[in-house]
Image: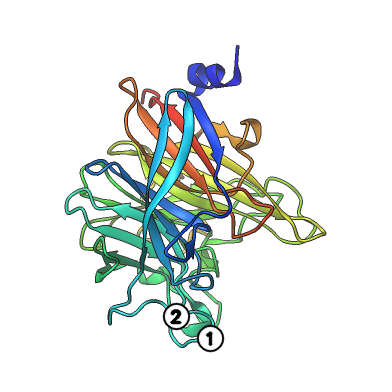
Amino acid sequence: MSWGALLGLVLSLNLLGALDLPKDLAIDGAPLGGISGVDYDRRTGEWLMISDDRSAKAPARFFVGRLDYDARGVKGLRLVRQIPLRREDGSTFPGTADAGERADAEALRIDPQTGDLVWSREGDAPRGFDPAIGRMDRTGRWTGTVPSPPAFGFDPAGAHGARLNQTFEGLSFSPDGRWLWLAMEGPLIQDGPASSVAQGGLTRITRLDRTGRVSAQYAYRLDPIQAAPARRGDNGISEILAVDDRRLLVLERSGVEDAQGRFSFHCRLYLVDIAGAQDVAGRASLAGPAPRVLTKRLLVNFDRVAGGAVNLEAMAWGASLAGRRTLVLMADDNFSADQAQRVLVFLFHAPRR
């Protein structure tokens, strides 16, 4: 029996195909790369892909394209256009040499009620900008913000709040658009240590209503770092995706740096259920009495999937095939020659509750 068939029987996933995108893909002078968020527009058949390029290669942007796949595999990606992200005054986000916030975009979702876009960015602490969730139209024009919990901001003294580069990594609307789920990549400083090789940290997944009010918040136990780094290593949430009204897919990613400065990545996909988990919205710290955390069930360890050992950061539902959802994941290549821009497509069937 093939590994793909075994996945389908045991884990409710069938790998349809994997494709490494060409490194020279570009449109209007903007190179494709750093893809950290993706979503599918069922009305147009287009895919929206946001880059975490901080205006180094081109102004911070998202791409619109058409991803060609079917039951026989993934055929290719055709870029249609690229759209710069805009600040409130209509200007694009600056690069390193200019004043203002450098946008580190990490997630992008289509609002199922309005068709407009919501996107998250990790903030720019050295320049005094906290993590944020923005609203924009399909032209990249700023249309507002979604308020986020004040506790998720940066503390200049480093005593509490978000850790650098471990902030707003995952976003997902509930299927009806009533709720917006927000995942922190790593633990808040007051919630305890970040993941290590020995143990995983505690991070927070929050359910916001459409005005940004916290409806519920849950503690999520991260995995340990998946291999011992020679230099740096981390593990955190890289994306989330709502399955139904109470279940989420959670994508975890470990990045491990070797002695030569090269990174390897170890990603796992979990099915998470909020039933039985404690609402921790009222807790200033998760240290102390241990909360009842979200239950998580491993669906895929990508180290064991052909073409899966890459930096997976983007995840979305695609078109249905044979009456089943397709699940698409994309890798962030960090604009590095030795990291792949890989697309993975699965057939998905949600396990029973």
Q: Farthest top residue?
A: 1
In the rendered view, would you say 310 is above or below 88? Answer: above
Disc 2 packing (10 Å; few <14; some 14–19; many ≥20): some
Residue 106 spot, x, y in % from top left? 45, 60
Left or right of residue 101: residue 196: right
Q: Which mark is residue 94?
A: 2
Give whichever of 133, 182 is nearer the camera.
133
Q: Farthest left residue?
A: 114
Q: Amino acid at mark 1?
A: Ala
Q: Quadrant of the N terminus?
A: top right
Give whichever of 200, 48 is nearer the camera.
48
> Which of the 4 quarters of the picture holds residue 69?
top left
In the rendered view, would you say 16 is above or below 36? Answer: above
> CA gap, disc 1 to disc 2?
8 Å
Pointer 1: what residue?
97
Q: Amino acid at mark 2?
A: Pro
Disc 1 packing (10 Å; few <14; some 14–19; many ≥20): few
Q: Please report contact status of discs 1 and 2: CB closer than 8 Å, yes or no.
A: yes
